[in-house]
Amino acid sequence: MNNKTALILLLLILAEYLHAADPKFYVMLSANNKSAASYLTYFESQFSIGLKNKIPCASYLSQSDVVAILDWERQKELLGAGDVNQLSNIAEAMKCDYLVHLRIRILENTTMIDAFIVKKGQDKVITRIAESAPNGDESLDAIENLSKQLIDELHQYNNQLCREKTWTGTIKIEQHTYEKLLNADDPGKPGGSTKSDLSVHCAVNNDVAQCTVNYSEQLTGAEGNSSTVASCTCQADVSIYVLEGKTSISVGMVTANGTNSGSLEGGGGFSSEITMPLGGWIVDAAIGTSTQSDSCSGSVTQSDLTITWSLTKK
């Protein structure tokens, strides 16, 4: 395998590492001797842990990962022995968003620690830190402090780095009721009944749902009967929360327009247009058929009300 073919293969392998997440970080490492290299491993570890904790959407690949992918001799052929320009070229070829350089030098009894971050497409360093400390525990403490400082300074770009994931999917609400009514004047005489049907289908986008609502109600009694029909294609506020495998959902109020009509026992009838508020539906800490931090589905029946959901966060 010639060098050109090996380099293409390397880039294809690295692409698998960096394909899924955004933003992408490539970390270059530099040490002036073996003692500095041992400190550098700790520096890289502290930075990697901090990046994952503070910016979880980030994809992370370092020079040490490249070494693990290729054998050492091939590594030296492709990258040169620590050639920073070559590493920068590979990071550019991989379309990394941020290039991080971690460097440690040991001069006599002093550890020199510095790092900087460059954003692709910008001709300036967006973050730079540096410190020196005596070799030993004080150097380790300095590395921890500088790693935290580097991540904290980087975190100010968090809104640009990690877009907020939003819930999308569907929520369906069905409610069917039937109730017998006593005769208010004489309980011994025939009474009446009331029957209602509600159907709500919502397409969820983050904290807003576009809903199709249909409602009907029929009231039958000794003194007459009435019928109410209302519907709307309307917007509702939505709150979705998943914690420890349990889903909580709240769908806000909507307003449906319709008619109320009927007839009276003594003759005659009536009809009028109505505006009907509906909603305030809640599912509280339900265990669905599938619940993860980024997806949930299930169905809950509460008395005569059934709420079904299928949601994904991405």
Image: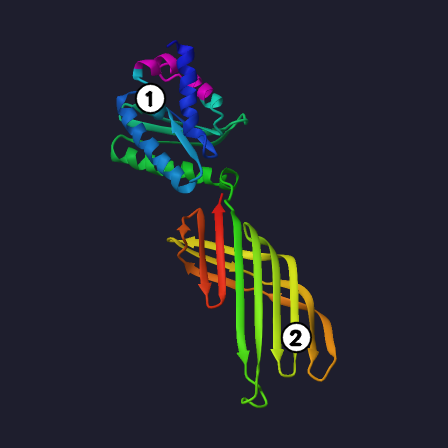
Q: Which residues are magenta?
A: 73-90
Image disc number at residue 169: none
Who is closer to the viewer here, 311 or 238?
A: 311
Q: Secondary structure at mark 1?
A: helix
- Regarding residue 31, the answer to whether it shows in the image is no
Query: What amino acid is found at the position of numbered circle 2 in the picture?
Result: Ser
- Mark 1, residue position: 67
Q: Residue at x 64, y 57 (%)?
A: 234
Q: Secondary structure at mark 2?
A: strand
Gap between marks 1 and 2, in whole Å? Answer: 79 Å
Q: Is residue 219 above or below residue 54?
A: below
Percent position of residue 20, x then y: 45, 33
Who is closer to the viewer here, 308 or 99?
A: 308
For label 1, the crowd category at 10 Å Cα-Cα, with few meaning under 14, some 14 to 19 and many 20 or more, is: some
Image quadrant holding the N terminus, namely top left
Residue 152 quadrant: top left
Residue 30 quadrant: top left
Q: Is residue 251 above or below residue 183?
A: above
- Mark 2, residue position: 226
